[in-house]
Image (spheres, rainbow, N blue to C red):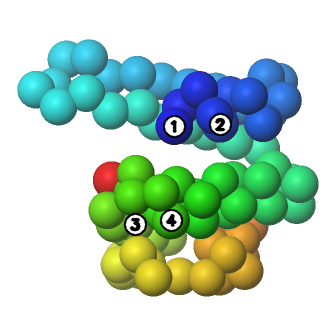
Amino acid sequence: MLDDIKAIIPADALQVFINQLDESQYATLECIQTEQNCSLIASAIVVWRQLGHIKNLVYRNGDVLRDVSDASQFQLFTMLRAPLTVLAVR
């Protein structure tokens, strides 16, 4: 999935940090929150979910933490546009 994100988001709008120190490796992505970038990421998440690559999505913004695994594409887009959003994809 990381390669897909790198392919659709311009390189100057995306930073990727890969943690290889923990037992389970994971990547953290920081993306410039433009309408186009958020739309592309929301679309990709919906496709990955339909293909079974995503088991759950957890949204965090400030004190708000909730499971958004069943969120629509528009809901994902809206969440991604909010400043300081963290979306954990598993």
Q: Residues within 10 Å of mark 2 (few under 14, many from 20)?
A: some
Q: Nearer the viewer, mark 3 or mark 1?
A: 1
Separation of marks 2 and 1 at Cα, in angstroms: 6 Å
Vertical side of 67 occupied by 59: above or below = above
Q: Amino acid at mark 4?
A: Gln
Asked whether the residues under the numbered discs 2 and 1 touch, taking CB atoms below 8 Å apart as contact, a structural biologist would say yes
Furthest-top residue in this view:
20
Separation of marks 2 and 3 at Cα, in angstroms: 16 Å
Separation of marks 4 and 2 at Cα, in angstroms: 16 Å
Asked whether the residues under the numbered discs 4 and 1 touch, taking CB atoms below 8 Å apart as contact, a structural biologist would say no
x then y, percent, for residue 73: 67, 75
Instruction: Report the front residue among 50 and 1.
Output: 50
User: In this figure, which residue is indicated by the disc labeled 4?
Assistant: 50
User: In this figure, which residue is indicated by the disc labeled 1?
Assistant: 1
Sequence-wise first label, 2 or 3: 2
Q: Quadrant of residue 77?
A: bottom right
Q: Nearer the viewer, mark 4 or mark 1?
A: 4
Secondary structure at badge 1 equals loop
Q: Amino acid at mark 1?
A: Met
* Residue under the point 48% across and 63% down: 49
User: In this figure, which residue is indicated by the disc labeled 3?
Assistant: 57
User: In this figure, which residue is indicated by the disc labeled 2?
Assistant: 5
* Residue under the point 65% across and 53% down: 44
* Residue under the point 34% across and 66% down: 56
Sequence-wise first label, 4 or 2: 2
Separation of marks 3 and 4 at Cα, in angstroms: 13 Å
Q: Is residue 78 left or right of residue 12?
A: left
Sequence-wise first label, 4 or 1: 1
Separation of marks 4 and 1 at Cα, in angstroms: 13 Å
x then y, percent, for residue 42: 67, 62
* Residue under the point 89% across and 54% down: 36
